[in-house]
Image (tube, rainbow, N blue to C red):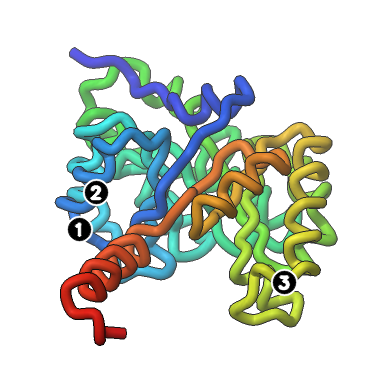
Amino acid sequence: MTGAPLNGFKARLRDGETQWGIWNSLASPVAAEALSLVGFDWMLFDTEHSPVEVAGLMPILQAAAAGTASAVARPAWNDKVLIKRLLDIGVQTLLVPFVETAEEAEAAVRATRYPPNGIRGVAGSTRASRFGMAPGYLQKANDEICVLVQIETSGALSRLEEIASVEGVDGVFIGPSDLSASMGFLGNPAAPEVQDAIREAAGRIVASGKAPGILATKAEDALRYHEWGYRFVASGVDIPLLVNAAQSMLRQVRPQSV
């Protein structure tokens, strides 16, 4: 009989370790399994900007369990029902999108906790509890859930300290694309004003006692963010990596290709 699952990502976050990740939105168990074996510390499975629904995410998580990367999932919204369903299929670390206020952060945390600390519904035989075979799961689950809140607007950024101070929030994640759009630089997260805000945010998150995280689409950006203090960094996105490699190969074999 197996014990209650532990959350290695949360433990390393608490210890201040740097964790390098990969963003997964291909909605494919095969891709998830392959990327899980590459050596990343964590993988983000996106259900906000991908066609993956809850039922489709479960086989993806099962496939990714072949490797060493910790699974992080982003629900489509900060919704207690969606969060409950992701937890039941075994997700222990959630990246909650578009958190604008401390109240919204509190709601996200409460959705992940069993009573009396929260409102998570109780189910006995789910993948989360190893289908009911994990002794003490209900008593240990709250401690192993990791909540990451995503700040994506200038308004949320102005309330960063209030959001980060919420008990149960383990990390604060900056979304460069939406943040740049909110700041008036749609499609241009490299704008100096946006990059200055991202750099300042890292220090503010650390000062709040929480772990800072971010998404990068290029290795040079990932390394720069790490230098600024970000500790869990998604260093690439699967679809652009695939497309860019395919375009590069095609240009080599058929040079006139764009």
Residue 216 vs residue 192: left or right?
Answer: left
Structural crowding at the residue carrying mark 3, measured as other residues with C-alpha within 10 Å and reported as few (<14), some (14–19) or many (≥20): some
Residue drawn 59% across and 44% down? 223
Whether 250 is drawn above or below 21: the answer is below
Give amino acid for label 2: Ala
Q: Is residue 182 left or right of residue 41?
A: right
Per the image, the residue denoted by label 3 is 191
Direction from residue 200 to residue 52 in the image, left or right? left
What percent of the width, then of the height, locates residue 53?
Answer: 29, 64
CA–CA distance in space, label 3 to label 1: 33 Å
Q: Position of residue 256 (x, y in %)?
A: 25, 86
Q: Are marks 1 and 2 in contact (CB under 8 Å)?
A: yes
Asked which secondary structure carries label 3, the reply is: loop
Q: Earlier in the sequence, mark 3 or mark 1?
A: 1
* Residue 98 picture quarter: bottom right
Identify the secondary structure beneath mark 2. helix
Q: Position of residue 67 (x, y in %)?
A: 25, 32
Q: Which residue is pictured at 71% across the width and 63% down the height?
A: 100
Quarter of the image with the C terminus is bottom left
Quadrant of residue 76 in the image? bottom left
Quick one: label 2 or label 3, which is nearer the N terminus? Answer: 2
Q: CA distance from mark 2 to mark 3?
A: 32 Å
Question: Residue at point 20% right, 33% down?
Answer: 66
Q: Residue at x 29, y 58 (%)?
A: 54
